[in-house]
Structure formats: C-alpha cells, structure tokens
Amino acid sequence: MKVAVIGLGAIGVQILWQLSRQDYVEVQGFDTAYPGHSMAGAGGDSRLFWNLELAELAYTPLIQRAAVAWRELETVSGAVLRDQTGVLVYGDEGDAQLDCAVNSADLIGSPIKLLSVSELRKRFPQFRFTEKSLGIWDQEGAVILPERTVAVTGEIARYNGATIHEFAPVFSIDPSGPRITVTSRIGTQEFDRVVVACGGWTTKLLPHIRDEVVVRRLTSMWFHGGDDNYLTDFPPFLRAAPSYCYGVPSHDARSVKLGLGFNDHYVTGDADSLPRHLTGEALEEQLSKFEWIQQKMLPGLARRPYRVETYVESYTRSMIEYIHRHPENENVVIMTGFSGHGFRVAPVLGEIGCQIALEGKSDIDISFMERTEPAFTILDKEQGITTHNSVMNSRGA
Ligand SMILES: Cc1cc2nc3c(=O)[nH]c(=O)nc-3n(C[C@H](O)[C@H](O)[C@H](O)COP(=O)(O)OP(=O)(O)OC[C@H]3O[C@@H](n4cnc5c(N)ncnc54)[C@H](O)[C@@H]3O)c2cc1C
C-alpha cells in the first residue's frame, strides 16, 4: 500500500515513523522544508510536556498514552528528546483550570505535589505570587526538544525505509478518484492513502475545514534575568487562565522563553502572508502584550527581550485536535488544530494517524473529540477572526 504524509512537523513526522514500521506500507513524506526546521509550529528550542489537563478531563487518556509513546520513541531512537525537569502548573486557588489539573492527575495517577503559597515563595523566589496562589508540581513533567525530536523521528523513519521529500511543498490534493492524486514541487503522484498534517497551512490545502480550524501566529520572547543569578533553579511553568502564560528556562539558567495565550496571538487566515519578522511598531505592540508578566509575575527579568521569534499554530473551536477523514474520500485523513498543546501528545497522535490511515479507525478512544464544547466562535473564516477564547485567556482580558 502506498501512503503519503503531507507535512513533516511535530505530528506528521510521528505518523510517518509509525507508517514506516508497517511491513506492507510504502510511505513517502513531503515537507515545504525538512523535518526539524524552525519556521512552522515546532520551532523555538523547547515545548512543555506536562501530565495534567487544564480544560477537558476526557483528554487525560491521551496524555497517559502519550507518556508511554514518548518513552518508546526515546528508546527506539536512543536520543535525548526531553529534559526531565518537572513542570510547575500554578494559578489562584479556585481557578477552574487548577481544579481540572488536580482531577486529571488523580485520573492518570500522575505523581504531583501541591504547593501552598508559602512553599511556592520558598521554592521559586523569582515569582511574585499572590496570597491566593496554589501550585502543582508535575514531577514527571519535562521540556521537549522540538526540532531535535522532529529531526530524529524523521531519521528513524528514513532508516525503516520511508522516503522523505524535502523542499517539496504539496500544491494540491485531488481526492475524487479511488486513488488520491498529490501534486507537489516534485510532480504528480497517486497514493492509496494520504494523511494531511500541515499545521497552520492545512486550511490552505483543504479550505473546507475553515469552519472548524483557525490559524494564529504566536510570538515567543526570550528574556535574560536582570542579574546573572535571578533564574537559578527557575522551573518550566504554565500559569492557568485567566492569566494564562508559560515559560521555559534556558539550559544555562540565564534566560527564559515566555509565551502567551490564544487571545494575544496574531489573527490570520493565511499562514503564508503573515508578517513573521517583527520590527518597529509591530514589535512594540507585541512587547506591550508581555509587559504584565514582568510587572506582575517576574519582576527580576531584563526589561527587553534579546530574542523574538514567531511561529504558526492551528486551533479548533473546541481546542481539541481536528482528526477527520475527508468528506469526499475516506482514504484522506486530516490531522490539524492541535491548539497549542500538540507536541506533548505527538507520539500518540502518530499512532492514531497511522491506524486511521490504514484501518479507518484507531484503537485509542478519541470519540470525546466530537463531544467537546466550542471555546469560541469563528466570525470570519477567511480572515480567521473569532470571538474571545476563555480556555487560554491571558490577563483575564
Ligand atoms: C510558540 C508555540 C509554543 C507551543 N508550546 C507548546 C508546548 O509547550 N507544549 C505542547 O505540547 N505544544 C506546544 N505548542 C503546540 C505544538 O508545537 C503544535 O501543536 C505542533 O507543532 C503542531 O504540529 P503540526 O504537525 O500540526 O504542525 P507543524 O509542527 O507546524 O508542522 C507542519 C509542517 O507542515 C509543513 N507544510 C506546510 N504546508 C505544507 C505543504 N503544502 N506541503 C508540504 N509540507 C507543508 C511545514 O513545513 C511543517 O513542517 C506550541 C506551539 C507554538 C507555536
């Protein structure tokens, strides 16, 4: 059986690897660039792997299986793909997301430690906590090395016999025949099955999903500590809504990368025509969105970032993965909309994508994805304009 995987980012490369392990499959992967590049949704040195769920308890079995799938990927590749640091999840007592996180840890049996405000202050003096702050230390949380993970997974897929077409953007997919025609920079080919995993570019290839999936440009900013020791023993952290934000310290403990939630991302309907390099007023405007973190949370950071980068991510209305077969041809599987949390579950999404492509269904129960309530409404699907999203809401805005 001949299978194409279009898009070899965080998710596509995992699907490619899983398909490459099947004896009867000849798998080919296509990417605009190459596995492990930093221009799409998987760049920027780090991604959080946390075992808790902040919004949707039904999601927890996926996280549980992901932990196993990560270990398998690390064993098979023999590479270090995550730093086992632990992750701090915190917010104010009574925040719905914190309650959900504690419940999800119970369900998964994930080792956590609850931290009172005095324990938080003692252990993490860099933060300005409020009297109502409550922390959850996710002991098995980790920091993923995203570019390395994608590149290494591509290599083990290649070792198994997968063909990887680098710098081979796919221009169109014709699902009308029994076999699927894929036209890319290297020509036109036919496949028995096609998996589309182009992240924020998926809506360009398959515009019919614009009713469910929107694209955002995310900005990451790297700040040094104001003094050299400010970030010593600083944890990777995720702060719950309504003050959603996250941070990952650098290996040398001299700087931290910060990111914000959905409502602060740049709205777009087209991942190709986005301004990606921020200068002048656009940079000033983005900086202003991060200022509250220095003012209210991390007062010891340097005033200005030393590095600013942008990335592209796709979001579903439910903030839960979009995994569907094409309405015109069930041999085309579409996987996108990982809504800011796809990397931590990427290896298990690889298993799911492989199973659906080959068997039409997965033995991992993802039926909850159909039942999850929308977190926002799409007001203009061409421009990607939506209503406010309370799930990843920064600053209570
Ligand atoms: C700044 C930022 C921080 C994040 N933090 C976290 C985190 O801490 N933890 C976490 O779990 N998740 C996090 N995420 C989410 C996670 O990184 C994404 O969910 C994940 O990268 C999405 O994977 P993807 O495969 O859908 O898209 P991508 O990783 O963007 O991959 C899409 C690929 O498709 C290729 N492509 C596009 N168009 C075509 C085409 N026409 N033909 C061929 N190839 C094409 C691109 O080149 C790219 O390689 C974060 C995302 C961002 C942007």
Image (cartoon, rainbow, N blue to C red):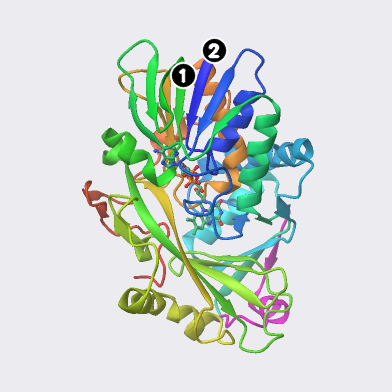
The magenta-colored residue range is 111-130
Q: Give the secondary structure at mark 1.
A: strand
Please give the residue where the numbered disc 2 appears in the rendered image: 1
Q: Amino acid at mark 2?
A: Met
Name the spot of residue 214 as percent of width and height, x first.
Answer: 32, 48
Q: Is residue 65 visible?
A: no
- Closer to the chain start, of discs 2 and 1, is 2
Name the spot of residue 39 as percent of width and height, x first.
Answer: 48, 54
Task: Give the total number of marks visible in the rendering.
Answer: 2
Mark 2 closeness class: few <14, some 14–19, many ≥20 residues within 10 Å: few
> In the image, what residue occupies the spot 35% across and 63% down?
263
Residue at disc 2, CB closer than 8 Å to ligand 1: no
Residue 315 covered by magenta stretch: no
Q: Is residue 332 visible?
A: yes
Please give the residue where the numbered disc 1 appears in the rendered image: 193
Q: Quadrant of the N terminus?
A: top right
Q: Residue furthest bottom?
A: 227
Name the spot of residue 75 as percent of width and height, x first.
Answer: 78, 39
Q: Residue furthest top?
A: 178
Mark 1 closeness class: few <14, some 14–19, many ≥20 residues within 10 Å: many
Q: Amino acid at mark 1?
A: Arg
Question: In whole angstroms, how far apart are the C-alphas of marks 2 and 1?
Answer: 8 Å
* Residues tagged 2 and 1 counted as in contact (Cβ below 8 A): yes
Q: Residue furthest front?
A: 186
Residue 117 covered by magenta stretch: yes
Name the spot of residue 104 as percent of width and height, x first.
Answer: 60, 49
